[in-house]
Image (cartoon, rainbow, N blue to C red):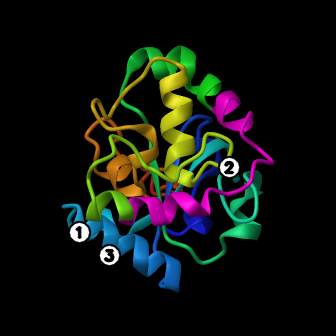
Amino acid sequence: MYFEAADLDKVKTGMVVAFESSGGFIDRRIESYQRAIGFDVEAAKITHVAVSMGGQYIIEATFPKSKTSNIFVDHQGRKLHFLYYDDEIFRDEQRKNVTIWAATRCNLDYGWPALLGFYLHSILPIWKSNPLSFHRAPFCSYLVAWAMRRLGFDPWPGVASNLITPAHIFASKMFPEEDVRRSLRGHLSSGNGKC
């Protein structure tokens, strides 16, 4: 779905916004890595994730620094998926807190070395986590995983936060996709024959 088709009232704080590959060099490398570690083509094409602030605003780890963004301005033309963690306590009480935790990472440098660390870990799996990831330099999926785990939610048990990729989030059964498309209003079939 393209964001222009979204009903902004349905986009909730705490949702994860998953972006499909733009086809650029880095996105193609991320897709390739995610397929190499076992994700199917559909999950592997998710190359970026962010935390929703509600409506068109997100918190994302991106180059050069983590920041808040407006999807209309910063991600025009990208195909999106809106994922909502499937936990009643999260949805009722904690969804806003995951956004607050993600916001504490704003203005930190982007974690470029971690992207290389994914490849090092796959070639030499001697580390239990990403050898080139730093807490003070998050990448997109680390930001989401870190914020979720700060609240005690762990949808990826046994996987270090700095090894979680966008595909881990998209493929998780704990993150079903939400339909946030605009609905047609004013049905013509009102039963009284009037429009």
Q: Is residue 89 left or right of residue 104?
A: left
Q: Which residue is mark 3?
A: 32
Q: Toward the viewer: 63 or 191? A: 63
Q: Quadrant of the C terminus?
A: bottom right
Image height check: is 95 above or below 73?
above
Q: Is residue 183 left or right of residue 173?
A: right
Q: Are marks 1 and 3 in contact (CB under 8 Å)?
A: yes
Q: Position of residue 97 (x, y in %)?
A: 63, 23
The reply to whether the magenta stretch includes residue 105 is yes
> What residue appears at the point 33 percent right and 40 percent down from the top-left corner?
128
Q: What residue type is disc 1 on?
A: Ala
Q: Toward the viewer: 155 or 42? A: 155
Say the numbered circle drawn on residue 36.
1
Q: How many marks?
A: 3
Q: Earlier in the sequence, mark 3 or mark 2?
A: 3
Front position among marks 3 and 2: 3
Q: What residue type is disc 2 on?
A: Ile
Report the magenta stretch's main SS.
helix
Q: Position of residue 28 (x, y in %)?
A: 42, 80
